[in-house]
Image (cartoon, rainbow, N blue to C red):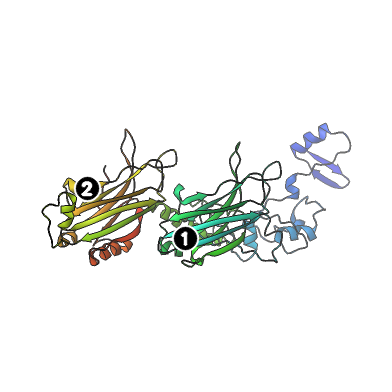
Amino acid sequence: MTVRKGNKRLAISIQEHMAIDVCPGPIRPIRQISAYFPRLSPTSSASELDPANEAGFPSELGPGSGVGAVGGGGGGSGGLLTPLLAGATGDGEGGGLSATSSMDTSIEIDSGDSDDSTALGTLEFDLLYERATSSLHCTVIKAKGLKPMDFNGLADPYVKLHLLPGACKANKLKTKIVRNTLNPVWNETLTYQGITEEDMYRKTLRVSVCDEDKLTHNEFIGESRVALRRVKPDQTKHFNICLEHPPPLPSPTASLPINPAVRGISCYLREWENEQQTCLEERGRLLLCLQFLPPSDVVDTEVKGEAKERASGGLCVGVRRCAHLAAMDVNGFSDPYVKTYLKPDLQKKSKHKTAVIKKTLNPEFNEEFFYEISFKELSTKTLEVTVWDYDLGKSNDFIGGVSLGCHSQGDSLQHWIDCLKNKGMKVERWHTLTNELPGSTFQE
């Protein structure tokens, strides 16, 4: 349908025709929202961004405001492009970080910070890495000026810690909840056990502030990420940071067109995929103590049992504790126990296991097992240590394990060599549990 107005013909769509039928008064075509907010694609050319080329573009959005709003180079202040398109019109480095990215995003506060940088609030905390105990302590002190999240203009904030890369529940620690305040004070210390110097170099601590909501899901307020390599061993480092919005989570399987708009995020996608693979491999940490006892020169005939076996020499394996185990049960925990196996040996005395610790991801065992064996034979053996989740009435779940021997690699090989070199000395070391071991079947 067309309406003649002077010498001009105005094309009217069926939707506008229906609106004209029900609306009295002069016939005036109804502008569609798309006329004010044109749909643009990442491949739009400069001519397509010109308001003069758009039919029916409203006169209120003239060149001064239209081009400035779209391209960012005019007088307008509002942007019609998404951040992805904004990256395409700029230097081609647009894009977002993944939600599990280990990039350091912390912003230190100084006296000249604007209100925009502190819109979500600020957070104070201390970090201390104790090299002797392989533990990382985070003391959450307080927050200021948090964003209101509840109807009363306040919030019920708490702080969550998360080591990246890593996805297991035991990697997450959280403080107590402080009710009805935007300036909470915690003064609470959260500790990660089994943190090696390698972890301090490659891992990042994600510090998040959330608001508890009993009726619905908890709400996210803001976060910051700190590279642990900034923390020197045995020295407390103080942080006073601005909270930020979380980075978007990209899909690793999404097909993205190759253009300048997405060129900048390709590296983040690769980083995201690498972190996911790493998360699948790490199943927790295990603290082991190895000691080779040489044969005693003096043999007491009255000594019996285990003491007599130790007098003849052998390997003492101490299972101290586990940390940050993968959760295997529906309640978010596990019922872990540890098995040791000195192989190749099919005899029952070559296998030992600890007691089961219920509902925990950080169990303490402090149990020792002794293998009567000569030094020459021990050099040809492999010690396999596995962690399991006990399930009543069905097969137990394998959590992770580690192999120590002359054919091992990395920390496992170094621990084994230190044990053989230092006879009679106890050698402790943390080990990363993996979801598979060479030549193992993991049958309970």
Residue type marked 2: Lys
Rendered view: 122 above or below 214: below
Q: Dot 1: what SS?
A: loop
Return the residue nearer the eye: 163 or 124: 124
Q: In which image quadrant can residue 66 be found?
A: bottom right
Q: Left or right: where does residue 343 sit relative to residue 61?
A: left
Distance from the alpha carbon under mark 2 to that under mark 1:
35 Å
Which mark identifies residue 8? none
> Which residue appears at 27% of the width and 51% of the height?
368
Nearest to N terminus: mark 2 or mark 1: 1
Residue 55 in the image: state x and y as whole percent: 76, 51
Q: Is residue 411 visible?
A: yes
Residue type marked 1: Lys
Q: Dot 2: what SS?
A: strand
Q: In which image quadrant can residue 48 be found?
A: bottom right
> Which residue appears at 46% of the width and 47% of the height?
169
Rendered view: 264 above or below 281: below
User: From the image, which quarter does the C terminus lie in?
Assistant: top left
Mark 1 — residue?
Answer: 203
For label 2, the crowd category at 10 Å Cα-Cα, with few meaning under 14, some 14 to 19 and many 20 or more, is some
Rendered view: 6 above or below 111: above
Which mark identifies residue 351? 2
> Which residue appears at 39% of the width and 42% of the height?
334
Residue 430 in the image: state x and y as whole percent: 36, 58
